[in-house]
Image (tube, rainbow, N blue to C red):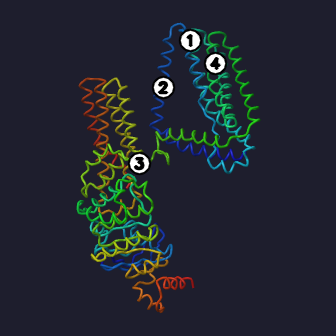
Amino acid sequence: MSLEINALSGGYGQVPVLHDVTFSVPDGQVVGLIGLNGAGKSTTIKHIIGLLKPRSGSIKVGGVTLASDENTYRQNLAYVPETPVLYPDLTLREHLELTMMAYGLDQKQALADLEPMLEKFRLQNKLNWFPDNFSKGMNQKVMIASAFMTHAKLFIIDEPFTGLDPLAIHDLLDLVRVKKAEGASVLMSTHVLATAETAADSFVLLGDGQVKATGTLDELRAKLHIADASLDDIYMAMTGEEGR
Amino acid sequence: MDKLWQTRLRRHQKNQAKYLQRVFNDHFVLVLLVMFGALLYAYSNFVRGIVGRPIWVSPVVALICAATIPLGRLATLFVPADATFLLPQAGKMRGYLNQARRYSMMLPAVVQLAVSIAVWPLMTVGGNPNVALMVALIILQLTVAYANMSVQLTSIFVPRWSRVRVWLVAGDFVIVLLGLTTWFLPVALLGVILAAGVTYRTVAARNRAQLDLLTAIKREGARMATIYRFYNLFTDVPGLGGGVRRRLYLDFLVNKVRPVQGNTWMYLLVRGLLRSQEYFGLCVRLIIVGMIATWLCPTWWLALLVNAGFSYLLGYQLLPLATRYRDVVFTHIYPVDPALRKQAWSKLVTIVLLVQAVLLGLTAIVHVPELMSAAALLLGCIFVPVLVRGYLTRRIAD
């Protein structure tokens, strides 16, 4: 298992946002984390990457918790945030170098691996630019490139389909497929259900800080007794139930 | 419109107070007080040393008085959006602008009062220290300053009135010089009447013309930019100078950090230090000021004290560099020991402070070339790691 979340409760300060969240991401799988605004997607991700501490329950990445082996935990994890935040004092090239250093990658090898990715994202002639001069999409591509050059076992992508142009989304999904083939797994949160439906192997549906349903598209269809339903239909049916 | 001025003024003052608090921090006030005291002392010694009444005294006094007239600009507190939103009201802005002129007069009034009192010992040197002269000078200077402000106000109605400001300065010089070399009181009275006449004429000129809102907004923008540039010397003003420069010529320093995992934070911090306007500017400024201060020290131990003091000042002001990247999520999720972050900061700051200590120490050796100055340089360098490890690193917020 790349990621195992067991009975996780937590949130910001005194207010618990997540209640007893349990799900897992098996090796070589792409899992979509689906939910309305405020359902707890970002909070869940913040717990996984260690920005928030669980109130109870546990999170294991590659079999270890943050408390038991911080270095292995972090080494196995790469993250692409929803809002791109870069270091204002580093050029694009230096951002990539910094990530190589932080993950202890071989610089030469990593640069060679990066080459096709930079070309795909049309970044190779902007290596000496500062983030101040980047567009929002470029920022996001830099983050994706930094994350995907690591040898992490688990990739967490927060809202990957907002802010990227269709070509970039296509390229990102290509990268995801490559990593998946290498045995890594991906957890991505999103509202863009149509893309998630084709990109993810299975889904975790969150609502009010609880896991409402998990499973592949077929399993979800069976659960809600709607044959041939799209993810969109399932999602609407679920949120409709909430409302009632 | 009166209410608009009141709300603008309140917002402006609140904003200024915020910056002034940062500019006049405890260290700076202390330095200013010492400098002010030293200046007064030097001035009183200077005046006492003058024998008789040298020929240059009157022109110098006249020059000082005239040169201070342009100080103090009209603060209209206009903002760019006014060009759209206040345009329908442009004809009814007179009350607003009169209040603006009254507020703007505060600074020149204080300056003229201070200058008149300050030049009084000089203007009466070798004669009888007549208080009436000081009072006459104060009245003259205030009237001319008010005329200057009125002319500035008029020039946003009729731009060519700007030229009158030069005549005011020249006129003030002539009147003061003439007064000092003949009979001061009648000549000063003449000057007051002339300045009041100019002020009176501006009223008529404004009444015949329309407010040039665009020019007024442009001038106010330039005025605020000057003020913010001044504040930026002491503190970080948002949207001004807080940026990042590539500084390719410093890359030889940046490249000294070997790209291995343990150096991750050092790699980041050294770039932050050398490329951000904020921290790089701070280092350059403080080192230059420190070298000047060291040059003024007549003894080795005073130079050592200054050296240690500047190590503390610079080190303390570099503390926020340690938390500069707190908002970047990667700082928290990289698989690098967070404890290394403080270590990297302390290593980098030690190097910076050592550079400063050596430069200040060398300045002292050049100025006071004795063996003890060399010892002071050594002691100044030894103090740096003690300061950084023993005190500063503990003050970094987690």
Query: Could you tell me residue A150's position as x and y percent?
Result: 29, 66
Q: Are marks 1 and 2 in contact (CB under 8 Å)?
A: no
Residue type beneath disc 3: Val
Q: Residue at x 46, y 29 (%)?
A: B34
Q: CA distance from mark 4 to mark 2?
A: 23 Å
Query: Residue A180, located in which quarter of the rendered image?
Result: bottom left
Chain assignment, label 2: B
Q: CA distance from mark 1 to mark 2?
A: 22 Å
The disc, 1 or 2, on the residue closer to the chain's N-terminal end is 2
Q: Circle 3 sits on which residue? A: B244
Q: Are marks 1 and 4 in contact (CB under 8 Å)?
A: no
Q: Residue at x 27, y 45 (%)?
A: B252
Q: Are marks 4 and 2 on the same chain?
A: yes
Q: Is A20 located above or below residue A91 in the figure?
A: below
Q: CA distance from mark 1 to mark 3?
A: 54 Å
Q: Which mark is residue B134?
A: 4
Q: Residue at x 68, y 22 (%)?
A: B139
Q: CA distance from mark 2 to mark 3?
A: 39 Å
Mark in the foreground, 3 or 4: 3
Q: Circle 1 sits on which residue? A: B125
Residue type beneath disc 2: Gly
Quadrant in which the C terminus of chain A is drawn: bottom right
Q: Circle 2 sits on which residue? A: B37
Q: Residue at x 58, y 25 (%)?
A: B68
Asked which secondary structure carries label 3, the reply is loop
Residue type beneath disc 1: Val
